[in-house]
Amino acid sequence: MLKPTIGLEVHVQLKTRSKMFCSCPVEFKAEPNTLVCPVCLGLPGSLPVLNRQAVEYTIAVALALHCEIQPFSQFHRKNYFYPDLPKGYQISQYDLPFSRNGYLIIETEEGEKRIGIQRVHMEEDTAKMIHGESISRTSGYSLIDFNRSGVPLLEIVSRPDISSPQEATLYLMELRSILRTLGVSTANMEEGALRCDVNISLERGTRTEIKNLNSFHSVRKALEYEIKRQEEVLKEKGQVIQETRHYDERAGVTLSMRTKEEAEDYRYFPEPDLVPLKIDPPWIEEVRSRMPELPEDKRKRYKELGLFPQEAATIANNPELANFFDSCLSLGAPGKEVANWLLSEVMKYLNARNLSIIEVPLSPEGLVEFLTVLKEGTISSKIGKMVIEEMLQTGDGAREIIERRGLAQISDPVLIKKWAEEVIKENPDQVSQYRQGKEQLFGFFVGKVMKLSGGKANPEILNRILKELLLRE
Amino acid sequence: MIFQPAHKILKEIRERNLSPVEVIQATLEWAQKLEGKLRSFLVLDPEGALAKALMLEEKLKKGEEVGPLAGIPVAVKDNICTRRMTTTCGSRILENFLPPYDATVVEKLERAGAIIIGKTNCDEFAMGSSTENSAFFKTANPWDIERVPGGSSGGSATSVASYQVFLALGSDTGGSVRQPASFCGIFGMKPTYGRVSRYGLVAFASSLDQIGTFARNVPDLALLTEVISGHDPRDSTSLPEPVPSYSKELDSPVGTLRIGVPWDLLQEGLTPEVKEAFEDALEIFERAGFAIEEVSLPHASYGIPTYYLIAPAEASANLARYDGIRFGLRAKGEENLISLYKKTRGEGFGAEVKRRIMLGTFALSLGYRDAFYVKAQKVRTLISQDFQKAFRKVDLIALPTSPTLPFKLGEKVQDPLSMYMSDLYTIPISLAGLPAISIPIALKNGLPVGMQIVGPALSESLIFKASYLFERESGLSNLKPPIVEELSA
Ligand SMILES: [Zn+2]
């Protein structure tokens, strides 16, 4: 197979209070065209004023991606005509972007891998077009909602360091978790808060670009398809054409949109309505001091607690889960055990119901109590699975559930001995086989005794007593 | 009464010898009388003006605070947004456009108690030097109705020169306040770039556009300029420095100044009448004790080609929003997006606007950008540096406003290049973002001649003081064109 070279260009909607250049609120569920003003409608005479919060969010993202923040950057006008672009140009950045030269780290099966970040820059979002059913060329219609017009966007461009569709997905997941940890974006692809274009070539040959992928699934599928397509083209014709392609989600194929020759000339020039953006080091430090711990650092810390890399990554890349996990740690619980339960029973429960950890009544205190109860030997891990499921459902404490449902482990040797004797008495054949050396039958006896105890016998004591009785003759 | 300076009328109103209603009625009557001959206004709003005057009257009766321009009738160029009156920019594409908001300068005028009686004619989107590029009609020069009033703020200049209003606002991108002030025999100020908020000024070339002021004497001009100046949080390019009281500072002594004259720039195109008037004006300064020195602005003669790359480039983007989608003209019967764009813009824009959009689009295009737009920006920097160097030697620079006397209507419409040359002496100052005034210095063949006084950034106060000295020495203020004499007789 030919080696793919992949680069990602991601657009992220920032969830600032107001839009990038006016004071209209940023909100995605409002009635169409209610969050608008002369500025974001591009009315004659209106002027943009840069939102400070958008700049601070950008500083935070640039820092999290290890980028060099430029002390001096500039906005440019990107000129093209389209009804979703009210001014006829988009305020974006060009040759003096906000920041450059960073990286992020993904956790692949072969270990950590660095993906370079070429640049992070700011621009404004366009309005949203809703296309009506078009029966013929003349009967169709399009509606425009300007609520989205002027919402701040970040453009994050990776270097072509990604070498498989899987890595592309990991890159996006890592990026998403950074953005969510920083609290600067919902980073939800399905809602359009995170949009992705990909560049792909084989063996560093001619590349194609696939535009507007709107789910993790589409990114992977489009790349897989495009790799196959380019391989076939190379086999048959020997030359891939440089072009922009579109991914048809339903058909699962990529289709040509325009070739390089048809590419638009955006006639960039410096935005004269805005002064150059100056970022001084104290401002950067101020933003840095307010930043939460990043997934990358969390992973490192978790690995030091004895978690496997994949376990550490799963928790660290889910800010809510990581918060929960950290709360358990601060209550003194052992990390490895917390992680075992979180990533098995708890995740299984959440995933089956499509819930997040903050949407269930289980608290970190609850989980820590549960682990204590388990350690004390009041219940077995098998019973534990039942208990934790009930905790996830009801939010009741482990002790409460054990008490109410009589699940406490039975450790009384007299009682256990009585059950063991009964089992030995009722299964003379197996007993004699065991005594003749068929030791694998031990499990059979354990199971029988457990059944009699209703699953509550303390396994350690049960093992000891059963062994004694079986060896006695 | 309407022939009095605004500052005198203000005093009379404040002392309750005159009522704002009397002033507005007299003004409107006179304005309407001249309007048939001059056509300064695209919109006149007598009802609105009268209502405002009545409101002021009430306030005055109650002894309430009324603001520094209370009761003064003013005109506003039609590329400045007003929610009360349409704002067309002299273009078909905005023929019925009523902005949902007021420009910052309009808010400031209203707060100061000024009464906006109408919106004045101008070259379409302020592109022109004669007001002949208005899509609606031509405005006449009150000194000779066969001649142009200059442009692009020709309507504002004519309205002030003919006493239709006391004061007016214009906009100056490459000379559009100073040149019509000169052609109409009045005073016109283009402040430092960023001194006056551009919020609500319909953009032509954003890095050059500056709202400016018209009046018939320096004290009125200084007062109007101080009212509209100042930082505006809605305009990122507006300057944060506090605004001095230009009108009060007029009374403090100006001292002996060094005045620079860029004779190298004046080699080109200067007509004998203007040259003579200018040399006489310099003598007035000399008699006042000022030192006249030669300064060199070696790159200023590249001003016109530089300007005609940068301004159209910015205009090509600024005018992209007129696409027929959200407001303004939309061509009828179009089937698809591209033809809707083409037809709307084809019908909505006039020839000069189209010429500049094409010029600007070309100057920014891939493969040409470096040779044109980028190079022009470099020359612009050199021109700015020329001025900086000159101001190390002198306090102010004086030069004619226009190389020629006002030309005839229709004389240059077919020859855009010779029209562009009309701004030869104003454009370098615009490129450098500096403040400059145009003041009347002579009448030649019955036509006014103007002189610019240019200063370093934010030196408006000094410029006003030097101009005021000239005004008193020359006696050339509150001039009455023949048509005004005739009709008032
Ligand atoms: Zn807005």
Image (tube, rainbow, N blue to C red):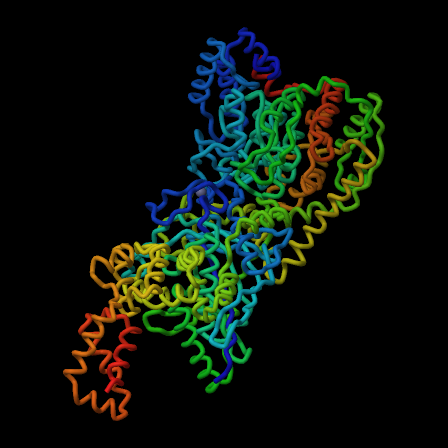
Residue B422 horizontal side relative to residue A27, left or right: right
Between A411 and A139, the residue placed more toward the observer is A411
Residue B311 horizontal side relative to residue A409, left or right: right
Total count of labels:
0
Image coordinates for residue A174, horizontal then vertical, percent:
47, 64
Classify residue B192 by image quadrant.
top right
Residue for point 40% across, 76% down: A225
Quadrant of the drawing holding the N terminus of chain B: top right
Between B258 and A13, the residue placed more toward the observer is A13
Between A221 and A470, the residue placed more toward the observer is A470
Image coordinates for residue A217, horizontal then vertical, percent:
37, 69
Quarter of the displayed picture in which ligand 1 can be seen = top left
Residue for point 47% across, 8% down: B61
Check the image and report above or below for B195 versus A25. above
Image coordinates for residue B373, horizontal then vertical, percent:
64, 54
Is residue B283 in view?
Answer: yes
Between A295 and B474, the residue placed more toward the observer is A295
Check the image and report above or below for B344 versus A224. above
Classify residue A223 by image quadrant.
bottom left
Quadrant of the drawing holding the C terminus of chain B: top right
